[in-house]
Amino acid sequence: MKYSKRTIYIFFLLVFFGCASRSPLSNRYISKNKNIQHLIKLGKSHWDRRVDPKDARLANHFLSKAIELDPYNLETIALYSRSCYFLGRFIEKSPAAKDSLYFEGFTKGWDFITSSPSFKLGFSSEDQDSVSRIMTGLENLSGDLLPVAYWWAENYTSYLLTKPALQRIERRDVLETVLHRLLSINPEYYFHGVNRIFGSFYAKLPGIELSQSENNFEKSISGDPDFLNSYVARSQYLFTKKGDKDSFIKDLQYVLNSDPTKLPEASPENLFEQEIAKDLLKKKDSLFE
């Protein structure tokens, strides 16, 4: 079958204008996606240099912008939440600034967790009250949520540790439910981090035997002895609670005498933990009056 030149010409015009009519939407999507990827790349690049406070802040900034454009990227949410914790623990000095960062970190994590399919599936049970449904949802979290849920727990615990004891008691069930779920997924995650969180939280929770805090810190330290945060947190929370000044000094001196680069992926954290150890040792007399 032969087509006239006019027919072919009209056909190409239709194809051209059809594509042109779709291009603005397509271009906007491509442009947005490229922008997101560029922001994530910048965030990760600065994060890798987080030993410099300026880079740590820039990492947090670019990751927050990426999340504004794409709030459903699990990896980005986890790293952003982690950067909030990093800034809160190591960089910012005022209690208000620390609180703000921890709050931001656990809020973003919680929003992501509670919008996940696995949480919604557990939450959908109709024969429970609202609190029980939340617990069921948390118990049902899928393994892929581990990084987000872990950094939610780090930020949430850090936030609660400076609050009145009643707040820790009231929020204990939610935190414990998430931590037990994380242990069931991977007890070794982030240098046995769940045990470290349990150790810190139980040291500051009224009505709990301090042996529970001790046992969790011991598990964390025996599992990853080169991650210095476990020793600092044990001194900061457990030994001050027990009034054990000798063990407090021993742990912190160990931190100061350790090589922070034994764990290359955690060298920045270890270096900053050494600074915290120095500050705590300077305060030892006031902490053990």
Image (spheres, rainbow, N blue to C red):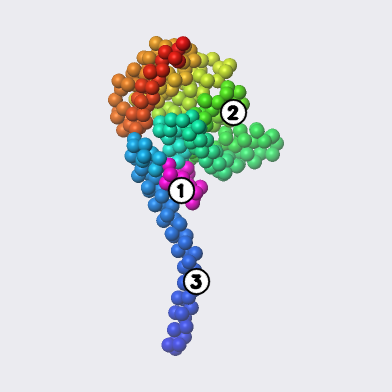
Closer to the chain start, of discs 2 and 3, is 3
**Alpha carbons under labels 2 and 3: distance apart:** 54 Å
Residue at image position (69%, 34%) is: 129
Q: Secondary structure at mark 3?
A: helix
Q: Of the residues shown, which amino acid type is indicated by label 2?
A: Arg
Closer to the chain start, of discs 1 and 3, is 3
Residue at image position (34%, 37%) is: 52
Note whether residue 166 is visible.
Answer: yes
Label 2 Cα neighbours within 10 Å, binned few <14 / some 14-19 / many ≥20 = few
Question: Where in the figure is residue 35, as x and y percent of width and height?
Answer: 42, 54
Taking depth in this image into account, of 102 and 222 the one nearest to the observer is: 102
The mark found on residue 65 in the picture is 1
**Alpha carbons under labels 1 and 2: distance apart:** 30 Å
Taking depth in this image into account, of 229 and 188 the one nearest to the observer is: 229
Question: Where in the figure is residue 276, as x and y percent of width and height?
Answer: 39, 24
Question: Where in the figure is residue 149, as x and y percent of width and height?
Answer: 50, 36
Note whether residue 155 is visible.
Answer: no
Label 1 Cα neighbours within 10 Å, binned few <14 / some 14-19 / many ≥20 = some
Residue at image position (47%, 85%) is: 7
Q: Which residue is mark 3?
A: 21
73 with respect to 259 (left or right): right
**Alpha carbons under labels 1 and 3: distance apart:** 30 Å
Circles 1, 2 touching at the beta carbon (< 8 Å): no
Most frequent secondary structure within the magenta stretch: helix
The mark found on residue 248 in the picture is none
Q: Which residue is mark 2?
A: 171
| Placement of 136 over or under 163, stated as above or below | below
208 with respect to 246 (left or right): right
Q: Secondary structure at mark 2?
A: loop
The part of the chain drawn in magenta is 60-77
Instruction: Examine the structure image and report whether residue 139 is included in the region drawn in magenta.
Output: no
Q: Of the residues shown, which amino acid type is indicated by label 3?
A: Ser
